[in-house]
Amino acid sequence: MLVACAAPPLLAESQVVRYPRSFSGYEYRDSYVLELLQLALAKAGSKQTLQPSAHSMEQQRALTELEHNHGVDVVWSMTSAEREARLLPVRIGIDKGLMGWRIALLPKSQQRRLKDVHSLADLHQLRAGQGHDWPDRKILEYNGLPVVPSSSYESLFRMLTAGRFDYFPRSLLEIWDEVDSQPPLELVVDPYLVLHYPTASYFFVSRHNPQLAETLRQGLERALLDGSFDQLFMRHYGESLRQAKLSQRRILELDNPLLPVGTPLTRRELWLSREDLLQLDQPLTPE
């Protein structure tokens, strides 16, 4: 009995993994990530189930809650040195680097706004819209691009149509769904330009929960190895990548001062390169 009392208690793995609940009407944005999260748990042999947080929350609040190990157990986000210092990243990019490929969302009345932009110097004359706490804002500003910030993701679309800024750079994984989700605003996708900077989006967990980080890492590695990761990714985003027509766009390269030293840039299987994307641009041949 004395031996039993002296032994430290075993910490049982939580049966649920809580993630940030989406705001009403924007649930579609999380469909791929939640499927990937479930795939990772399954590949790792975990019996844990996914559960949304009690309340919807903006990204910065979700990251703060995660840092304090309260309310959520996992958040997905673009990485930065500051975020990796506060939280525990699972350094397997969930987006294959494509959050760093940005196409402009524009009001329909200004759909030719970027037609004559051929350099960063040209783009310096226009204002971009971004979330005030997004890493993208700091990246654009570091490259000398004027930015108008907002504390609300949803308000950025209305600010764009109201002329508060000139263009809204969005990931080519996001932009098509965002246009479809905002029909009253009459938004269009710019056909001329794409911005690119190296970055990665990861699952982040609390530094108090390394067990979950290891579970997700193992599951993602196994999904990469057996091809199920890539199958899921292309099922969700293959058409968006073809629709972007990158071979017909001018590519402007930006520096990313926020990229952490530990970013696994040399692991070829974690990224889609420019060459990969240009190949996906080719029309599908019917079988």
Image: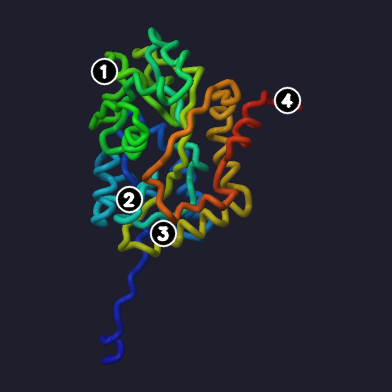
Front position among marks 2 and 3: 2
Quadrant assignment for the N terminus = bottom left
Point 47% across, 55% down: residue: 41
Q: Which disc number belongs to residue 83? A: 2
Q: Which disc number belongs to residue 273? A: none
Residue 102 versus residue 157: which sits nearer the camera? 102
- Kindly report the distance in space between the C-alpha atoms of the residues bearing marks 4 and 1: 43 Å
Please, what is the three-letter code of the amino acid marked with disc 4? Thr
Give the image location of residue 54, x and y in percent: 25, 44
Give the image location of residue 117, x and y in percent: 45, 18
Which of the two labelled residues, at mark 4 and mark 2, occupies the earlier sequence position? 2
Residue identified by numbered label 3: 213
- Kindly report the distance in space between the C-alpha atoms of the residues bearing marks 2 and 3: 15 Å
Residue 47 versus residue 207: which sits nearer the camera? 207
Question: Can the viewer see residue 93 in this picture?
Answer: yes
The relative height of residue 118 versus residue 102 in the rendered view (above or below) is above
